[in-house]
C-alpha cells in the first residue's frame, strides 16, 4: 500500500512566523495556490482514502483533491492535529520572549522537555500522533492508496518514528508537495520526499 502525505497550505500566520498549532485558521491565497498545485500533481493518481486532521486548513487543502477523486472515502481524525502551544498560540518569537522570557529560554534550550503554560507536552503530542497512526495501520494495510493531509509537526513525528536517525527540526514537508511511503510491517518505508 502507498501512503501519500502532505502538509496543509500556507496560512497568514505562517508568513508572520506565529506559533498556532491549535488555532483553527484558514489557508491564505498562497495556500490556495499550493492546494491547487498539489491537486494537479495528484490528479492522475488513484486514491482510495483521503484522511485529514480536524482543522480548516487541512480541509481547505484537501478539498480540490477530494473534488478530483469523488470515489475516495474521506475521513477526519483529530488525532492528526498539530501540537497546541497554549499561551503561546498566535504569538511570534519576539512576543513570546517578551511575555514569557524564562519559559521561552528554557524551551529554546530543551524544546522536547519544556512545555509552555496550557500547551500539550511534546511527549503527549508524539504519543497522540503515533497512537492514531497505529489505529490507522490496519486501514493502511488494506488500502491500495491513501492520502493523509496533516501538519508539519504531525508529519515529522510520523517520519521520525519510521526513519531512524531523522533529526526532527531538519525535516521539512513543503506545502504544495507530497511525500510517499510504502507501508510494510507496521511502518512506513520512505519512497520519495516533497515531490
Image (spheres, grey):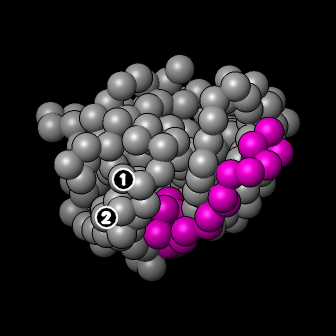
Name the residue: 43% across, 73% down: 119
The single residue placed furthest to the left in the displayed view is 165
Q: Along the horizontal axis of the image, is 149 left or right of 24? A: left
SS at mark 1 in the image: helix
Q: In the rendering, which numbered label is found on residue 96?
A: none
Residue to which mark 2 is pinned: 134
The single residue placed furthest to the bottom in the displayed view is 118
Quadrant housing residue 103: bottom left
Question: Camera-side residue: 172 or 115?
Answer: 172
Does the segment drawn in magenta span residue 131?
no
Quadrant housing residue 22: bottom right
Q: Give the residues drawn in magenta, as a range.
A: 66-93
Q: Along the horizontal axis of the image, is 91 left or right of 57? A: left
Residue to which mark 1 is pinned: 141
Question: Camera-side residue: 191 or 109?
Answer: 191
SS at mark 2 in the image: helix
Q: Residues within 10 Å of mark 2 (few under 14, many from 20)?
A: some
Q: Is residue 30 visible?
A: no
Q: Along the horizontal axis of the image, is 141 left or right of 44? A: left
Question: Camera-side residue: 134 or 34?
Answer: 134
Q: Residue 95 at what x, y percent from top left?
A: 56, 55
Q: Residue 60 at what x, y percent from top left?
A: 77, 51
Q: Residue 120 at what x, y percent from top left?
A: 39, 72
Name the residue: 43% across, 60% down: 139
Q: Are marks 2 and 1 in contact (CB under 8 Å)?
A: no
Does the segment drawn in magenta span residue 83?
yes
Q: Is residue 142 visible?
A: yes
- Mark 2 vs mark 1: give the one in front: 1
Q: Residue 127 at what x, y percent from top left?
A: 28, 68
Q: Residues within 10 Å of mark 1 (few under 14, many from 20)?
A: some
Q: Along the horizontal axis of the image, is 12 left or right of 131? A: right
Amino acid at each position: 500500500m502507498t501512503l501519500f502525505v502532505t502538509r496543509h497550505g500556507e496560512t497568514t500566520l505562517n508568513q508572520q512566523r506565529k506559533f498556532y498549532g491549535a488555532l483553527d485558521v484558514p489557508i491564505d491565497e498562497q495556500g490556495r495556490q499550493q492546494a491547487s498545485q498539489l491537486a494537479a500533481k495528484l490528479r492522475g493518481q488513484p486514491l482510495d482514502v483521503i484522511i485529514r486532521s480536524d482543522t480548516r486548513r487541512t480541509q481547505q487543502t484537501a478539498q480540490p483533491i477530494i473534488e478530483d477523486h469523488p470515489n475516495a472515502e474521506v475521513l477526519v481524525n483529530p488525532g492528526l492535529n498539530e501540537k497546541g502551544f497554549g499561551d503561546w498560540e498566535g504569538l511570534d518569537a519576539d512576543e513570546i520572549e517578551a511575555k514569557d522570557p524564562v519559559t521561552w529560554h528554557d524551551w529554546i534550550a530543551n524544546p522536547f522537555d519544556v512545555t509552555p503554560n496550557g500547551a500539550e507536552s511534546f511527549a503527549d503530542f508524539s504519543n497522540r500522533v503515533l497512537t492514531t497512526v497505529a489505529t490507522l495501520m490496519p486501514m493502511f494495510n488494506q488500502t491500495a492508496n491513501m492520502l493523509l493531509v496533516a501538519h508539519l509537526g504531525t508529519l515529522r513525528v510520523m517520519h521520525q518514528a519510521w526513519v531512524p536517525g531523522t533529526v526532527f527540526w531538519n525535516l521539512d514537508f513543503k506545502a504544495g508537495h507530497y511525500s510517499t511511503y510504502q507501508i510494510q510491517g507496521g511502518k512506513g518505508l520512505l519512497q520519495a520526499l516533497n515531490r
